[in-house]
Image: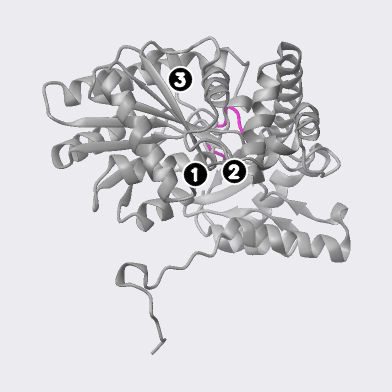
């Protein structure tokens, strides 16, 4: 018997992250045989064509210009007021929805999701998301005594599976006081899929109807981690306007992060942004989420907040930020286009990709396929129903020919697509 002194709810907890595991193996091999001889498609960060981690130049300069006080001072628990204004502006752009809008600083986008699960669902509740999702959603739910429930994101025609979504929501609303829905769109991780404007319209009409006249609430959580690499700056934000003027029992909380758009991955800086027609709900949002921040990590990263603020208050720096993002959006798209064209040529199926850091290849035997590819010094991420390729981090030179190699591994192990 293994000795344990953990409390009952903590016994048996263990997390081996297959993404970081594969990345560590890829890096160790690259040190032995050279970076040029290894394809590392695991990293969820932008790497340039030379394989170097990208930090936007305007962000680098903002960090260098920080004063000692800006770096080391304790920040307010809710976040600096000018930071909260900046994240609301950066998130919504020209598509700010009508309503009471408040924000709270969090420890990255992960902090947003933690607070929502903790404060807007009950012990034992289901939390709904799509079957293709970031794996940490599940552990966040489990660690808070909730269960992650999945609807089918993509139907057999490659479109948003609205019918399956409705089925799950109806069932949850019939059983729970609050129904929390995490919708990772645009640029879904791991597929690159996104809901269209018409899809969002359908979703909102349905959500209004399903809780109309009931003492039940929908907590709708657009996780927009990859927003800044999902399309033209204002065009990709237009769906936010749809969240204005909703009924009081449909509460929108946007999960915003500085990790991708500002290349501040390790700084762990984000914000939760609420939209509601009711001032009391917005005030409660600030009160309860500040409390939970104080009870977990206390206050957030001062240097990261001040760096963002100092960029966002200068129109010239914002223009530079937008221009740099556009360069890397174009680069990622070029990489994705190479892969998709070659995949079509060799008969390798992939899920509908519109934008973002990842493309997913659906298949059985994902782990065996990844093991086979590692023998060829190719490192990808095995998922329950497929394999994830990070086009954000693989150069165009290394992307070329990769689809055929994956197809060869699929055929070699007898996997089905």
Instruction: Specify the quadrant of the image occupied by residue 159.
Output: top left
Residue identifier under label 1:
110
- Position of 402 with respect to 259 (left or right) is right
Q: CA distance from mark 3 to mark 2?
A: 29 Å
Residue 121 appearing in the image: yes
Residue at 64% x, 24% y: name it: 309
Part of the protein shown in magenta: 350-357
Residue at 73% x, 42% y: name it: 393
Q: CA distance from mark 1 to mark 3?
A: 25 Å
Residue identifier under label 2:
268
Residue at 77% x, 52% y: name it: 39
Tell me if residue 29 comes above or below residue 257 in the rendering.
Answer: below
> Decide: marks 2, 1 in contact (CB < 8 A)?
yes
Question: Of helix, strand and loop, which one carries label 1?
Answer: helix
Question: Of helix, strand and loop, which one carries label 3?
Answer: loop
Residue identifier under label 3:
196
Question: Of helix, strand and loop, which one carries label 2?
Answer: loop
Residue 220 appearing in the image: no
Q: Earlier in the sequence, mark 1 or mark 3?
A: 1
Please tell me whether mark 1 or mark 3 is closer to you in this view: 1
Please tell me whether mark 3 or mark 2 is closer to you in this view: 2
Residue, far bottom: 1
**Location of residue 185 in the rendering, given as x and y in whole percent from the top left corner:** 48, 30
Closer to the camera in the image, 152 or 96: 96
Quarter of the image where the N terminus is located: bottom left
Q: Earlier in the sequence, mark 3 or mark 2?
A: 3
């Amino acid at each position: 018997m293994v000795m344990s002194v953990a409390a009952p709810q903590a016994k048996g907890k263990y997390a081996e992250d297959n993404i970081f595991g594969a990345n560590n193996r890829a890096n160790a091999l690259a040190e032995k045989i050279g970076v040029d001889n290894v394809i590392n498609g695991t990293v969820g960060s932008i790497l340039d064509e030379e394989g170097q981690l990208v930090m936007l130049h305007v962000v680098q300069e903002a960090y260098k210009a920080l004063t000692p006080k800006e770096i080391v001072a304790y920040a307010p628990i809710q976040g600096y007021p000018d930071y909260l204004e900046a994240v609301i502006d950066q998130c919504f752009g020209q598509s700010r929805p009508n309503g009471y809008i408040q924000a709270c600083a969090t420890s990255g986008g992960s902090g947003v999701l933690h607070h929502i699960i903790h404060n807007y669902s009950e012990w034992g509740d289901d939390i709904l998301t799509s079957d293709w999702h970031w794996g940490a959603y599940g552990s966040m739910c489990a660690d808070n005594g909730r269960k992650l429930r999945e609807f089918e994101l993509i139907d057999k025609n490659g479109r948003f599976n609205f019918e399956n979504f409705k089925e799950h929501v109806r069932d949850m609303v019939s059983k729970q006081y609050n129904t929390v829905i995490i919708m990772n769109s645009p640029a879904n991780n791991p597929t690159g899929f996104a809901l269209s404007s018409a899809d969002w319209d359908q979703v909102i009409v349905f959500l209004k109807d399903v809780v109309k006249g009931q003492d039940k609430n929908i907590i709708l959580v657009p996780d927009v981690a990859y927003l800044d690499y999902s399309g033209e700056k204002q065009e990709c934000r237009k769906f936010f306007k749809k969240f204005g003027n909703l009924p009081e029992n449909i509460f929108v909380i946007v999960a915003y992060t500085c990790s991708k758009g500002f290349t501040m991955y390790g700084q762990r800086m984000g914000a939760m942004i609420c939209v509601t027609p009711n001032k009391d709900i917005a005030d409660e949002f600030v009160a309860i989420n500040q409390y939970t921040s104080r009870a977990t990590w206390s206050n957030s990263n001062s240097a990261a907040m001040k760096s963002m603020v100092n960029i966002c208050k200068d129109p010239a720096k914002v223009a530079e930020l937008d221009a740099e993002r556009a360069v890397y959006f174009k680069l990622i798209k070029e990489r994705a286009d190479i892969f998709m064209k070659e995949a079509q040529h060799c008969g390798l199926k992939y899920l509908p990709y519109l934008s973002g850091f990842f493309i997913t290849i659906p298949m059985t035997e994902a782990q065996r396929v990844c093991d086979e590819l590692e023998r060829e010094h190719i490192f990808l991420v095995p998922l329950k129903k497929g394999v994830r390729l990070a086009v954000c981090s693989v150069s165009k030179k290394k992307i070329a020919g990769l689809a055929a190699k994956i197809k060869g591994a699929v055929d070699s192990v007898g996997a089905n697509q």
